[in-house]
């Protein structure tokens, strides 16, 4: 989009239709554009498509108040920021987890009342590209005395797990909502669950994870 | 390709219920869109024809907002946009 020479724009009847430069300083205009884009940055892709058009309209409504070059710079920065946000939103980590314990919990103790979630499995997850447990990214699951991370699984899934078994875990990072992440167990299924970072000091020492991960 | 897209946008504007003056304004605004933005706009107004009327009012309000230092005008625009986009996002 080009916003230069707005005063020369003509309507179908050859009338001049664009506004004169506003009184708002350029910095104020850019601030308003940022304010406007902030409306939909956390919305879904559909709303963003509409929002971007509204943003373009703002830039043109600002007329000469926002120099072409500055608008292009703003647009470029905005596009880069959006690209980064989109990339992060789609960031999915694949790690390996080891079953540490399988517990059959009384139903009343299971947070999720769905009967298919009556088993919880205690796992630890490491990243594939490191031989050492990541100090921040490993997760452990279900400790009745101090729940850290929960990975509820179905009864059949839990019964098929063995202590020490290595399973793959898909961990989908959902940005913008720090309390809720998603976890899948090996099969690629993603289940939204609340995750809390476990205490890194509880990670088992020197657990190598350079093997090719094996799905359960 | 661009001309074709803009042509379709103009057609959509021309058959809208906006006044001739408003149509002219919008056509000029849209003619300044980049290729990508124009393509996106075409899809959106085909998907939601009432978006044109919203854009018309939105543009006029923004002209006023940018020509005045009255923050309340801008805030009102943002409120309208937020309501509109929230509805879209459902």
Image (tube, coloured by chain):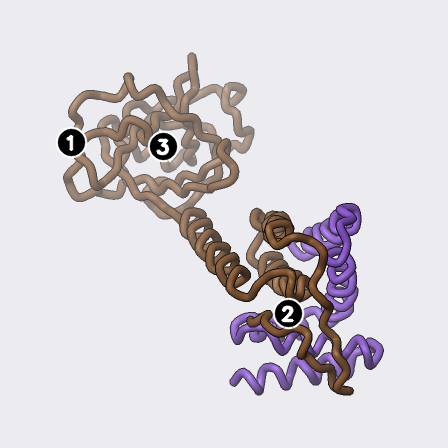
Chain colours: A brown, B purple
Q: Secondary structure at mark 1?
A: loop
* Residue A215 picture quarter: top left
Residue A123 higher or lower than A68, as above or below: above
The subunit carrying tag 1 is A
Residue A130 in picture, x, y percent from top left: 20, 36
Q: Secondary structure at mark 3?
A: helix
Q: Which mark is residue A49?
A: none
Residue in the picture at 39% in, 26% down: A197
The subunit carrying tag 2 is B
Residue in the picture at 78% in, 64% down: B60
- Give the Cα separation between the discs numbered 3 and 1: 24 Å
Disc 3 crowd rating (10 Å Cα; few below 14, some 14-19, many 20+) is some
> Which residue position holds label 3?
A158
> Which residue position holds label 2?
B44
* Residue A212 picture quarter: top left
User: Is residue A130 in view from this perspective?
Assistant: yes
Residue A128 in picture, x, y percent from top left: 22, 40
The subunit carrying tag 3 is A
Q: Which mark is residue A208?
A: 1
């Amino acid at each position: 989009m080009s916003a230069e020479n707005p005063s020369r724009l003509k309507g179908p009847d050859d009338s001049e239709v664009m506004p004169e430069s506003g009184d708002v300083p350029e910095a104020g205009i850019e601030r308003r554009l940022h304010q406007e884009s902030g409306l939909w940055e956390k919305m879904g892709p559909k709303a963003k498509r509409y929002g971007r058009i509204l943003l373009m309209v703002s830039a043109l409504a600002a007329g000469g108040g926002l120099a072409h070059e500055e608008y292009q710079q703003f647009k470029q920065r905005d596009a880069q920021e959006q690209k980064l946000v989109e990339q992060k939103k789609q960031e999915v980590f694949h790690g390996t987890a080891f079953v540490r314990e399988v517990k059959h919990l009384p139903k009343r103790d299971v947070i999720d009342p769905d009967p298919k979630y009556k088993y919880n499995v205690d796992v630890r997850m490491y990243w594939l590209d490191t031989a050492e447990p990541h100090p921040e990214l490993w997760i452990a699951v279900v400790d009745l005395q101090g729940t850290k991370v929960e990975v509820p699984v179905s009864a059949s899934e839990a019964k098929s797990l063995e202590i020490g078994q290595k399973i793959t875990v898909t961990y989908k990072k959902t940005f913008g909502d720090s309390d809720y992440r998603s976890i899948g167990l090996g099969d690629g299924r993603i289940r939204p669950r609340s995750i809390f970072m476990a205490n890194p000091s509880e990670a088992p020492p020197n657990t190598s994870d350079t093997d090719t991960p094996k799905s359960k | 390709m661009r001309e074709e897209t803009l042509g379709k946008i103009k057609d959509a504007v021309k058959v809208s219920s906006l006044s001739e003056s408003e149509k002219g304004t919008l056509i000029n605004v849209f003619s300044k869109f980049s290729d990508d933005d124009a393509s996106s706009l075409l899809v959106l107004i085909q998907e939601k024809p009432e978006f044109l009327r919203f854009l018309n009012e939105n543009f006029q309000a923004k002209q006023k907002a940018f020509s005045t230092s009255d923050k309340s005008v801008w805030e009102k625009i943002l409120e309208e946009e937020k309501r509109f986009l929230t509805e879209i996002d459902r």
